[in-house]
Amino acid sequence: MYLMRYLSFALLTIGSLASEHLASIHYTISRRGGSFPAPDIANLTYLLEQLKEVELRFNATTRDFVGNKVVRKPKRQHGTQSSSILLGEVGREGNWFANLHIGDPMQEVDMDLDMLTADWWILSTSSEKGSFYLDFNSKTYVEAESPLTVPTCREPTDVIHLPTIKQSISASFALCRPAKQWIRSLLPSGAYLGLAPSAALSQTKTTSIMQQLIEKSIIDTPVWSLVLINGKDGIYTIGGTSASSLRQAEVETNDELARYANYEVKRDVLVASRSTADIEMATALSSEEWKWSQVQGAEGWWQILMRGVWVDGIKELENQLIVLDINTPFILASPVAARAFYSSISGSRKLPHPHEQFHAYPCFNPPKIHFEFVGWNVEVFKGNRDKGTFSPGGRFSLGRMAPGSGYCIGIVVESRMGHKTSIGSDAAKMGFERNMEGGNGLEDVWIVGEPFFRDVQVAFNWKEKKVGMQRV
Ligand SMILES: *[C@@H]1O[C@H](CO)[C@@H](O)[C@H](O)[C@H]1NC(C)=O
Ligand SMILES: *[C@@H]1O[C@H](CO)[C@@H](O)[C@H](O)[C@H]1NC(C)=O
């Protein structure tokens, strides 16, 4: 596709502009299956299916104690050891992914990004689905000596070719090859990059690619970041941040539009290329521009405190914990929080069963919403959807409730994730019983998904465990 080709070109030419720090590595990313659908009339069946899928992904872990710390750990699946199946789903529709270049001669493998898991692995199955890494075709492949504790996985090394900085390094990774008789051998092949900050979630106990890049002095900043250009294209950056200001860039695209007039380049593409260059020059991580929040709660995910939720200029909720996840197409809130939120939107109403997790509001009057974090307020879900897609009610809308209806489904939905799980006897011994019983720790937590990543560029410092934000 032309868009991706241009982006790669643009990203390749700006690698040398950084000064104080080593240059960051930029990967273009895409959403598998394209943008989340934004039809005129919402397909409630589809939306509910997607919501259940989100809840399942979040429900795959549980909390436990390690020493005196509460951490998230993979849940035992029925009849299996928790370590026998890796968290995450290679090749899942709706995952954001980059292209991993590996081996000699170079092979291209789709690499899904997952903020809820912590392992870097390649799944190689006998199914025809997905994208393939063929170790026997690579001259630089070095077989591992001993298997990992995760069944069917080993830890070989091969050469990884890094985009934009144009370097190649030898790196180790988990390579998992389920035997033919396993159900898992029917799954798609491909690579998977867990981006969660806690090693407690790691099942392979291997060293992440980002850590290896630090150890080999390829990058010097323990930060990765994401910026989305539209509903299906974005930039994932390792070792720094992607873009200082898309707003600024947007003003200046006219020259370039003329220069690239022979091609039917979208404005979006130019914005992306310009903003990536901007950040390299601005060296990025200055504290005035980036607002940092410390990660909180059970160690595992990118969970931070949102100071407030403002609806039409009034602070309706304060001190809400949120988990950031780019692969979630909604904003999920607890039933209590979601109802408080919609009660301040006049004319809004909850949908009847079986769609009671959704609320509708008058399409002609979308609310003005701000999320407040340490030191700043940012307006979210503002404006229209991507060109080429149509949904009444702007970006806050998932579509009309029914044909001809003046009501639109809001992108903030009620979660059903507050269920009971036991945290084990250690917790009881330590007197945590009352606090921990009652759940997986998600009953009061918001899941802030992809729509937010369109409004804010987000940087993740995995060493200091903090999240930085800046307006797009
Ligand atoms: C709505 O979604 C369901 C489930 O994904 C799908 O089977 C159905 O075809 C969709 N309906 C329309 C009108 O698109
Ligand atoms: C989450 O998993 C538990 C079992 O561990 C199950 O009882 C519960 O129904 C699940 N919740 C959701 C929302 O899927």
Image (cartoon, grey):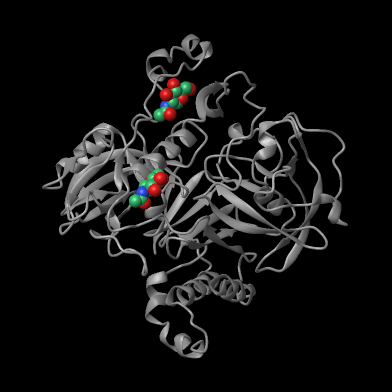
In the image, 328 versus 118, the foreground residue is: 328
* Residue drawn at x 37%, y 72% as measured from the top left: 247
User: Which quadrant would residue 391 be assigned to in this image?
Assistant: bottom left
Is residue 240 something one can see in this rendering? no
In the image, 372 versus 116, the foreground residue is: 116
Is residue 400 something one can see in this rendering? yes
Check the image and name the residue furthest to the left. Answer: 346
Q: How many marks?
A: 0
Residue 191 versus residue 217 in the image, above or below: above
Residue 25 versus residue 436 in the image, above or below: below
Residue 16 position in % (x across, y down)? 64, 75
User: Which quadrant would residue 81 be assigned to in this image?
Assistant: top right
Residue 359 position in % (x across, y down)? 23, 42
Say left or right for 151 vs 70: right
User: Which quadrant would residue 80 be assigned to in this image?
Assistant: top right
Residue 246 position in % (x across, y down)? 41, 70
Quadrant of the image where one finds ligand 2: top left
Residue 283 versus residue 348 in the image, above or below: below
In the image, 122 versus 66, the foreground residue is: 122
Residue 472 position in % (x across, y down)? 39, 64
Say left or right for 167 vs 274: right
Quadrant showing the N terminus: bottom right
